[in-house]
């Protein structure tokens, strides 16, 4: 799939500011899973700009405006080609060896421990939040991966950090719980044949268990498709029962880490078809395009695979990764510092993703 992405942001200050420095994480990744073929970033008023890659591999554009100003506008135009069509296409590791595979990967790439051990208010230990009617799947049944850090021959095969999964929009045979049309929300897996046997974690592949966990998320929480912010604490999601894609991504990251699998938070863009009305739902409406969040879990034999609990899908070529982190605090869209008397800001943010070429 080839996409053109245009993002426009305009910030007005209540009073003049100066020595304004800011960072932006809005450009798509360029890696084995997606190719960034064009990129143009414009800042008005003209600013001193630069670019670097942060410790998570995110492309960070920075700018400095030293003179006094009351507003700033940023326009990004990018073209990207997503390359991996089928997230189920990988060499399967036997369920009984999955945690051994993870242990070998941790041994060979200790940096992955960041995505396993980190806990925060946004990504806490879910056991502390469990309550009647809102009890997460029994991830504690999985044996911890950390104590056994023996190198395992071939354990990290396919573990390319930053290679996203993709779903081919062409018609083909789909595993249960996976749906080819991005214009429809994927149905939650149901039935005993799809329910993960959490009490015997080694008896089913973790990929199947995580698909079942997405179904639990859909049953337990309501997705707010128009919300763009993440709650400062996941406890608020459990209290209110409704959250943004960012909240549900944080929940899924916490669940996977609790099972003993490295997981990371991902922010990015979606195929525009996801925002179109659902032809099977007469009450649905056209939604404005906004950025989206999902989780990526290190799957034995596959490497990073994306799970979107908000839309009940495995991420595929209709998902465009922009930034990753342990949680949303690691990859903010914009970070600012400035001098001045401004007490308030008014912001406008517009996003338009267009399909240039359909891979099907």
Image: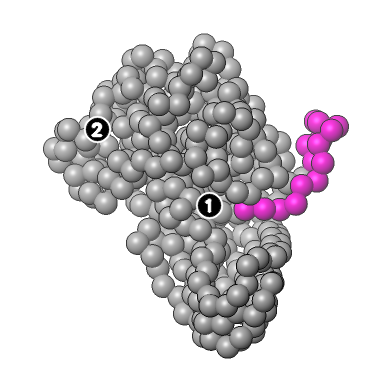
Q: Which residues are magenta?
A: 277-291
Mark 1 / mark 2, whichever is N-terminal:
2
Q: Relative to residue 116, is residue 58 drawn left or right?
A: right
Q: Is residue 157 magenta?
A: no
> Tag 2: Cα neighbours inside 10 Å, few (<14), some, or many (≥20)?
many
Q: Is residue 3 above or below residue 71?
A: above
Which residue is painted at 66% across and 45% down in the image?
227
The secondary element bearing badge 1 is classed as strand
Residue 289, position as x, y percentages in the image: 71, 53
Quarter of the figure that contains the N terminus: bottom right
**Quadrant of res 312:** top right
Q: Residue at x 56, y 82 (%)?
A: 18
Q: Is residue 165 visible?
A: no
Question: For the image shown, how many numbered marks are present on the structure?
Answer: 2
Residue at which label 1 appears: 267
User: What residue is drawn where x is 86% and y is 32%?
Assistant: 282
In the image, residue 6 lies at what x, y percent?
67, 66
* Left/right of residue 193 with respect to residue 107 in the rendered view: right
Residue 13 in the figure: left or right of residue 199: right
Q: Which residue is mark 2?
A: 145
Q: Above or below — where is 319 with respect to 225?
A: below
Q: Position of residue 318 (x, y in %)?
A: 60, 49
Q: What colour scheme was applied to this rendering of the protein?
A: one colour
- Nearest to the observer: residue 22 or residue 305: 22
């Amino acid at each position: 799939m080839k996409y053109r992405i245009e993002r426009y942001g305009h910030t007005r200050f209540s009073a003049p500011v100066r020595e304004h420095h800011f960072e932006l994480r809005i450009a798509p990744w360029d890696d084995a899973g997606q190719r960034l073929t064009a990129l143009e970033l414009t800042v008005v008023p003209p600013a001193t700009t630069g670019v670097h890659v942060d410790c998570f591999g995110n492309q960070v554009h920075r700018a400095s405006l030293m003179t006094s100003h009351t507003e700033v506008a940023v326009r990004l135009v990018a073209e990207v080609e997503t390359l991996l069509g089928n997230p189920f296409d990988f060499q399967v590791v036997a369920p009984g060896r999955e945690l051994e595979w993870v242990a070998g990967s941790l041994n060979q790439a200790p940096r992955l421990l960041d995505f396993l051990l980190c806990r925060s208010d946004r990504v806490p230990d879910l056991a502390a939040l469990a309550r009647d009617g809102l009890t997460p799947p029994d991830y504690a049944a999985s044996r911890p991966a950390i104590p056994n850090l023996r190198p395992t021959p071939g354990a990290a095969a396919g573990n390319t950090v930053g290679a996203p999964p993709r779903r081919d929009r062409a018609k083909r045979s789909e595993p249960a719980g996976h749906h080819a049309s991005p214009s429809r929300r994927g149905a939650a897996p149901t039935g005993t044949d799809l329910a993960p046997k959490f009490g015997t974690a080694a008896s089913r592949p973790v990929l199947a268990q995580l698909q079942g966990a997405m179904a639990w998320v859909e049953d337990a929480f309501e997705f707010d498709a128009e919300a763009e912010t993440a709650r400062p604490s996941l406890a608020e999601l459990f209290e209110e029962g409704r959250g943004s894609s960012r909240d549900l991504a944080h929940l899924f990251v916490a669940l996977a880490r609790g099972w003993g699998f490295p997981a990371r938070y991902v922010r990015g863009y979606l195929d525009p078809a996801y925002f179109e009305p659902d032809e099977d739902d007469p009450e649905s409406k056209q939604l404005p395009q906004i950025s989206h969040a999902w989780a990526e879990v290190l799957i034995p034999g596959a490497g990073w695979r994306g799970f979107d609990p908000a839309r009940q899908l495995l991420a595929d070529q209709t998902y465009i990764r922009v930034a990753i982190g342990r949680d949303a605090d690691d990859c903010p869209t914009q970070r600012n510092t400035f001098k001045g008397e401004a007490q308030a800001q008014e912001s406008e943010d517009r996003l338009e993703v267009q399909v240039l070429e359909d891979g099907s």
